[in-house]
Image: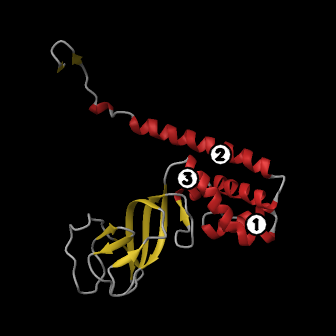
Amino acid sequence: MAISTYSELQAAISDWMARSDVSGSAADFITLGEARLNRLLEVVATTASLTGVSSSNVVSIASLSMVEPVSLYVTSDGTEKFIPPSALGTFFEQDTPNIPSNWAIEGTSIRFDCPLDIPYPIRFTYQGRFALSDAAPTNEFLTNNPDLYLAASIVWGCTYTKDGAISMWKSMLDEFVSEVRSINAQKKRSQLRTDPMLQRRGYNYATDVTS
């Protein structure tokens, strides 16, 4: 079974717990599992599927746990078009409805440079907290670490059903979190290494000049 989306994760929880009666509570297990992941791990790249509003230049993102926006794409005539971001107040806003050319974040909304002429499908990517939903059905972490996401959720499922398997899932969760934190630390160390071409080849402390 693939576990790459919010709905697939909910189905997997019921499947791995072998309990059809928890399907209605799977979303709660995921939310509680994400609460712990948010405390232990860094922000995650997330993709949200939004829909624009005809004759409006604003789309609400209040339901998203966004930390920082990344990119935005609008689908027109079956083709996805990249819309470049701009700082709020740096682009001219038109009154005529059209496909947008610029966007910026304004509070809990995306603001375009013009009203939309039709309700365009929008793909919005951002760095955010762990918070899967129907509006944001997947994120980079779920794609790369479905085992950890499943374990974090099932720990709460076992708590809810008083299942003795909780110790096994808790052990796997702790192991997976430790592995991911170690990988992230290695990536950070790699990113912090100075490019050899930028390093100073010699330094004379007496004259304070590069040799």
Q: In which quarter of the image is the C terminus?
A: top left
Residue 104's disc number: none
Q: Earlier in the sequence, mark 2 or mark 1?
A: 1
| Secondary structure of the residue carrying numbered label 1 | helix
Res 38 label: 3
Residue 111 sits in which quadrant? Answer: bottom left
- Percent across and percent down for residue 101 are 27, 74
Among the 4 quarters of the image, the one containing residue 29: bottom right
In the displayed structure, would residue 81 be above or below residue 95? Answer: above
Residue type beneath disc 1: Ser
Q: What distance separates the C-alpha of mark 2 from that of mark 3? A: 15 Å
Q: Looking at the rendering, which quadrant does residue 160 occupy?
A: bottom right
Q: How far apart are marks 2 and 1 (CA)?
A: 21 Å
Q: Can residue 80 be seen in this view?
A: no
Q: Please report contact status of discs 2 and 3: CB closer than 8 Å, yes or no.
A: no
> Which residue occupies 36% across, 67% down?
107
Which of the two discs, 2 and 3, sits closer to the camera? 3
* Between marks 1 and 3 in the image, the one whose residue lies nearer the viewer: 3
Q: Which mark is residue 14?
A: 1
The structure residue drawn at horizontal position 42% and vertical position 68%, both measured from the top left corner, is 124
Please tell me whether mark 3 sits on a helix, a strand or a loop.
helix
Of 190 and 42, the residue lying toward us: 42
Amino acid type assigned to the residue bearing label 2 in the image? Phe
State the count of labels: 3
| 103 is higher (above) or lower (below) than 167 | below
Q: Label 2: which residue? A: 176
Residue at 57 percent of width and 65 percent of height: 132
Q: Where is residue 42 in the image (x, y as percent from the top left)?
A: 50, 49
The amino acid at mark 3 is Asn
Cα distance between the residues tagged 1 and 3: 23 Å
Mark closer to the chain start, 2 or 3: 3
Q: Where does the image place residue 24, in percent across and percent down from the top left?
A: 72, 72
